[in-house]
Image: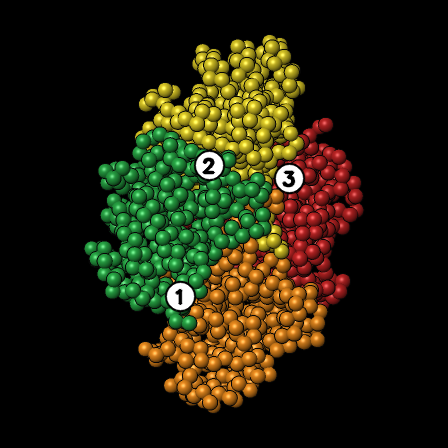
Chain colours: A yellow, B green, C orange, D red
Amino acid sequence: MEPLRIAVAGLGRMGRRHVQNLIYRVPRASVVAVCSTEAHELEWARSLEDYKEFNVTVYGSTDVHASQTLAAIKKGLHVLCEKPLSTKMDEIAACVDAAKARPDLKVMAGFSRRFDASYRDAATKIFDNKAIGSPFIVRSNTCDLLDNTGFFVRYAPRNGGIFVDCAIHDIDLSLWYLSDPVPKSCWATGTLQHHPELAQMNDVDNGVGVVEFWGGKIAYFCCSRTQAHGHDVCTEITGTEGKVSVNVVPRASNVVVADKLGIRNEVQPEYWQRFEHAFALEANEFTESVLRDKPVPLPLEKGVKVMEIGRALQDALLTGEVQRFNEKGERI
Amino acid sequence: MEPLRIAVAGLGRMGRRHVQNLIYRVPRASVVAVCSTEAHELEWARSLEDYKEFNVTVYGSTDVHASQTLAAIKKGLHVLCEKPLSTKMDEIAACVDAAKARPDLKVMAGFSRRFDASYRDAATKIFDNKAIGSPFIVRSNTCDLLDNTGFFVRYAPRNGGIFVDCAIHDIDLSLWYLSDPVPKSCWATGTLQHHPELAQMNDVDNGVGVVEFWGGKIAYFCCSRTQAHGHDVCTEITGTEGKVSVNVVPRASNVVVADKLGIRNEVQPEYWQRFEHAFALEANEFTESVLRDKPVPLPLEKGVKVMEIGRALQDALLTGEVQRFNEKGERI
Amino acid sequence: MEPLRIAVAGLGRMGRRHVQNLIYRVPRASVVAVCSTEAHELEWARSLEDYKEFNVTVYGSTDVHASQTLAAIKKGLHVLCEKPLSTKMDEIAACVDAAKARPDLKVMAGFSRRFDASYRDAATKIFDNKAIGSPFIVRSNTCDLLDNTGFFVRYAPRNGGIFVDCAIHDIDLSLWYLSDPVPKSCWATGTLQHHPELAQMNDVDNGVGVVEFWGGKIAYFCCSRTQAHGHDVCTEITGTEGKVSVNVVPRASNVVVADKLGIRNEVQPEYWQRFEHAFALEANEFTESVLRDKPVPLPLEKGVKVMEIGRALQDALLTGEVQRFNEKGERI
Amino acid sequence: MEPLRIAVAGLGRMGRRHVQNLIYRVPRASVVAVCSTEAHELEWARSLEDYKEFNVTVYGSTDVHASQTLAAIKKGLHVLCEKPLSTKMDEIAACVDAAKARPDLKVMAGFSRRFDASYRDAATKIFDNKAIGSPFIVRSNTCDLLDNTGFFVRYAPRNGGIFVDCAIHDIDLSLWYLSDPVPKSCWATGTLQHHPELAQMNDVDNGVGVVEFWGGKIAYFCCSRTQAHGHDVCTEITGTEGKVSVNVVPRASNVVVADKLGIRNEVQPEYWQRFEHAFALEANEFTESVLRDKPVPLPLEKGVKVMEIGRALQDALLTGEVQRFNEKGERI
C-alpha cells in the first residue's frame, strides 16, 4: 500500500515536533510538504491548489486553524486539525458544514488526549469493566510550567483565553467520561499572578471553572500558566462505585532521588513529553482511516460542544455571572 | 498542678471517642462528667448549675452546640466547642458575644485539622520556610465513605447542608493558608447519587463549590458523602513558587499489597482514623490554655467567617445564583 | 486499679523519650524512679534493693541491658528490656534462665516493631487474610540517617556490630513473618564509607547479609549508618500469591511539596519519629500483662534465636565465610 | 541515505516484537529477512552465505546466540546480539575474539536496559549531576510474573540458570553504576516455590545473590519467576550523598483506581511493556553506528564480565560455597 502523502501546515514549536512524529512514528505516512511559520501560513493555505494529491494536518496557531481547514476541504483534502478548531463559533460552524458537505473526506478533530494510553485505559476501566459504577463528577486540570521566555505571553492574544486554550482538553475529557452530557450552567473565576499583561486581553493566568450538566453530572477544572514544578495535567472521574484517576501524581519517569531534601521525582516540563506517544497514535489512526477508508476516530463536530462550553466559561470569567444553557445545550 | 476537670456534652459516636482521648491522651485533664445522648443533651446543659468547678467540651450534634456553649459560658465555664458552632448565624453571634463578655473564660473553636501534624507542617513550610512563594489557590476536599447504615441520613437534617457540615474544615483551611482573605463571591452545584432522601432537606450528597476572595485569591471545594474507598480528605495550596499538598494520595498506613490486582494501599474509613492524633492535640492545647491562662489557639470568633462562607455556598447550591460579598466581607 | 509503678533504667537519648511516653501515653503506668545515664546505670541496678514494690523497664545501652535485667529479676521485679538483651550469648542465656526460674515475673523482650500498627497490619494480612499465600522471602532494611555529631561512633564499641545492633529488628521480623524458621546458613559483606573509625572495632557502616533457612525460606538485609535522606526502614514479605510491603517509600507525613526540583516528601529523621506510637503500645501492653497477670506479648527467650542469627551474620562479615547451622538451628 | 538492511534471527515471542519494532520504530532500518523459530535457526545461520549485503540482529534463544553471532561475523556482517551471548564462557570468548579480529564490523551486546530512558536518566544524575556522591551499593531485582502456561519451564533448560538468565541485566547495571568494579566474592541461595521441575536442572525459581567487589562496593540481587502482580524490575543505587532508584513502585501507567479495596495501580505483565521503548532505541543506535560508522554503544566484550559474575552466582547457588575472584577479577 502506498504511504499517505501528508502536508503539514504550521511549523511552530509544536508543528516541528509533529513533523518529526509523522516521519519517525507513522510508518505509513510520508511528509511531502511543510510550510514555514507565521505570515506564510495563510499564504500556504492559498497555495494548496497545487497539491491536490495529498492530505493535510493542521498544527498552526489557533487563529488560523479554521481558515486552513476550510481551504483544505475546499481543495478536496483530508484534514487532521489540532484543537481547537477556532475560538469563534461561526468559523467552527463553517468548517463543520464544509466537512459534512464532503462525506468522502476524512476531517478529524485532534483531541490528542483521547489517544493517550492512560486516558484510554481509564475509558476501558469505566465503560468496559464498569470499575466505578456510573460516572458523575470529573475533575480535570491543565497546569503549564511557568514560561519566563515571553513565548506564552506573545502567543496569548491568539489563543481565545485560558478556558478555551487550556481547559479545552479537560472539557473534552469530561464529555467523554460522562457520556456526552448536556451543559446546564457554568461559572468561573481567575487571577493574575505572573503575567499582568494578560489583563488587557481580558484573560487570567490561573482559573477555576465549574460546569453543571443536565441530569446531575458535574465537571470542574483548574487551569494554570504558572506552575513551578512542570506540566501537571490530571483527571479524576468519580462514579457511584469508585474513582479512576489519571496522573494525579505526575512523574517524568520512574526515577526517584533520595537526598537531604527527602524523596523526589521530576515532572515533565511540557505537554510534549507527557503526550508524545498520544500524538504519534493520533497521526497513525488518522492515516489508517484515510488509507482504509474508515470513519475517523473523532469527527470534526466533536469539537463544537467543547468549544461552546469553553467559551461559556470564558464569558463567566469575564462577567462574573453564571452562564446558562437550555436542555438542548443552547446558550440562553 | 491539679488536672483540669472536664465535663463532656455529647456522647454520640464521636463524643465517646473524644472522652477516650481525654482520658488516655490528655494527661493533665480529668473527665469528671459526661452526658448521655440525644434528649438528655439539652437537659444536661440546664443541669450545669451543679457543676461549677469544671470546664466543658462540647462534642454533640451541631444543632445543640450553640445552646450548650451559651449555657456553659453563662455558668462561667471554659468551653471547647466542636465545629460548627451552629448553622444559624444569630446563634453564632450570640455565642461570640457571650464569650467576649467573659474574657476570663477560655472559649475555643474546635477546628481540629488545625491541630493535625501534616496541616501544621504545611503551614510551617508555607509561612516560615516560604516554600511556595505567595499562596493564592486552595483546593480542599472532604469526601466521606458511603454510609449504608442509615446513620448519616438520619443525622442529615441537623447538619446544615453539605457545605456547612462537610466543607467547613476546608473553608477554614483556605482562610488559614490564604491569610484570612475576604470573600467576594461564590458559586456551587451538587448532585444526588446515593441518598435521594436528602432532596427534601434541600441538600445533595456530592457538591462542588468555588469561592473568589478580594485580591485575587481562590478556594474551591469538593464534598462527597458517597466515596467507595474511604475517608478521602486532601488539600492543595498553590503559590507563586510552588505547591504544598496534604494527603492527596490517602493511605491508611504504610502497608502495600501486591497481588493479581496490582499494587494497592488501603484508606482510612473515617475521619477519626485520619485525625485521631489531631483531636488529642486539640484537647491538650485547650487544657494547657486553661491551666496556664494562655490565649486559646483558636478563639470562638474564628468560626464566624467560616460559617458565613459555608452558608453562602449552601445558598448558591439552592438558588443556582452567585452569592456576593462586599469588600468588608458582608453578604450583599 | 492502681497504676503500675515503673522505674526506668537508662536516660540516654532514647530513655528520656521512653519516660515521656510512659508518662503521657501509658495511662495505667506511673513512673516512680529513673536513673541518670552512663556510670550511674550499673549503680542503679545495685540500688534496686530499695525499690521492691515496682517494675522495671530497661532502656539503657546494649552492654548493660543484661546486667540490669538480671539484677531486676533477682529482686523480683517485672522487666521490659529493650532489644538486644546483650551481645553475648552467655549473658542472654543467663537472663533467660533467670526469667524461667521466676514464672511469676513478667519478663518481656522489647522488639518494638512488633507493636507498630503497619507491621501488625502486615501480619494480619498475611496470617489472617492469607493475602499472599505462603510467605517465603523477607527483605528488610534498617538504614539510619548519617550522624555527623560523633554520637553514633562513640556508642559503636558497645553495640555488637551492625548486624547485631542494626539488623536485629529485621531478623526478628523475618522470623515473625516466616513463622519461626530454623536458620541453615548465612553470609554477609560490608563496606566503610563515612566512619573509617569502625574498622578498629571490626565493623562496617553499610552491610548486606543473606540468611537461608531450612525448608526453602530466605531473608536478606541491608543495614546502613549513612543515609542522606532520613531513617529508612522497610520490609517486604513475598509469598506464593503476592507480596506485602511496609514503608518501602518512607514518608514523614502526608505532606508533599512541588517546586522547581519536582515533587517531594520528607522522611523521618530517626526511628523515634517512625516508631513513637509502637513504643507507647509496647509499654501499654507490658503494663497490661503485669496488672492483669496475662502472658507478655514477647517472652524474653524470643530474643535468643534473633541474636544467634545476628552474631552469625557478624561472624560472616568478619571472616568472609559462610556460617552454617544444623537442622536444630545450632551453629556448626 | 539508504536504509540499513537487517535480517533477524529468531522469531520467538520476543523476536516477533523486535521485528515489529524494527519496522515501525527504526526509520532508517529495513527488515529484509527473518527466520522462523527453533530448528530453523541454526539452518538460518548456515544460509547466511546468500545474504552478504545486510546486517544481522540476533534475538533467538540463548543457546544459539553464540553460533549465530559467530556465523554472521564470519560472513562479514554487523551484529546486534541480545543478551546473554551464551551460557558457556568458551563460546563467549570465541565470539569476542572473532569480533576483535574484524574491527570493521559493528558487533554489539544487547543489554537493553542501558537504552531505557529511566536508567539513562539515573546515570545522568549519578555521573553528570553527582546527585548521590560516590555510588557504592546497587540493589537490583528482576522478578517475572508467574507463568502458568508452561512456556517458561520448557525454555528453562536452555537459559543457563536464574542468575544467568534473569540477573544478567541487574549485574550489568551494577557494573555500569559502580563504574566497572572488579568482583571479589559472591554468594547466593534460592528456593523452589512454583516450578519443582527446575530441581532437575539444578535451578530455582526464586534466588538471592550478593556480590562483593574489590574496593568496598557491593551489589545484591533478587530474582523471581513467580510474582503475582506483574513484571517487577527495580534498581536502587546508593551513594555517599544519596540514593537514586528506578521503578521501585512499578506502574503500568499513570492510571489509579480507588474502590472498596483501596487505591491501586496495575503493573506491566512482561518486560516488553516495561522496555519496549528501550528496545527501539537500542535498534536505532545500532543502526546509526553502522550507517555512520560510529563505535557501537556497547561492544560485545562488555558481556564477558557480566556473564562471569552470573556464572559465579549460579555456582554459589549450586554448591552453597562462596565463590572468589582475585584482584584481576579472575575466578579462583
Instruction: Kindly identify the amino acid type of the residue bearing the numbered disc 3.
Output: Leu
Q: CA distance from mark 2 to mark 1?
A: 38 Å
Instruction: Kindly identify the amino acid type of the residue bearing the numbered disc 1.
Output: Val
Instruction: Please report the residue visible at 72 percent of the width from the left and 56 percent of the height from the top.
Output: D180
Q: CA distance from mark 1 to mark 3?
A: 62 Å
First in sequence, mark 2 or 1: give its number: 1
Looking at the rendering, which quadrant does residue A276 occupy? top right
State whether residue C271 appears in this view: yes
Q: Are marks 1 and 3 in contact (CB under 8 Å)?
A: no
The residue indicated by pointer 2 is: B213
Chain letter of the residue beneath label 3 in the structure image: D
In this rendering, the answer to whether D273 lies above or below D2 is: below
Chain letter of the residue beneath label 1 in the structure image: B
The residue indicated by pointer 1 is: B26
The residue tagged with tag 3: helix, strand or loop?
helix
Instruction: Kindly identify the amino acid type of the residue bearing the numbered disc 2.
Output: Phe
The residue indicated by pointer 3 is: D281
Residue mark closest to the camera, 2 vs 1: 2
Q: Of C82 and B17, which appears nearest the observer?
A: B17
In-image side of D279 versus B327 (left or right):
right
Q: Position of residue B231 (x, y in %)?
A: 38, 50
In this rendering, the answer to whether D180 lies above or below B50 is: above
Q: Position of residue C6 (x, y in %)?
A: 44, 79
Residue mark closest to the camera, 3 vs 2: 2
Callout 2: few (<14), some (14-19), or many (20+) C-alpha neighbours within 10 Å? many
Q: CA distance from mark 3 to mark 2?
A: 51 Å
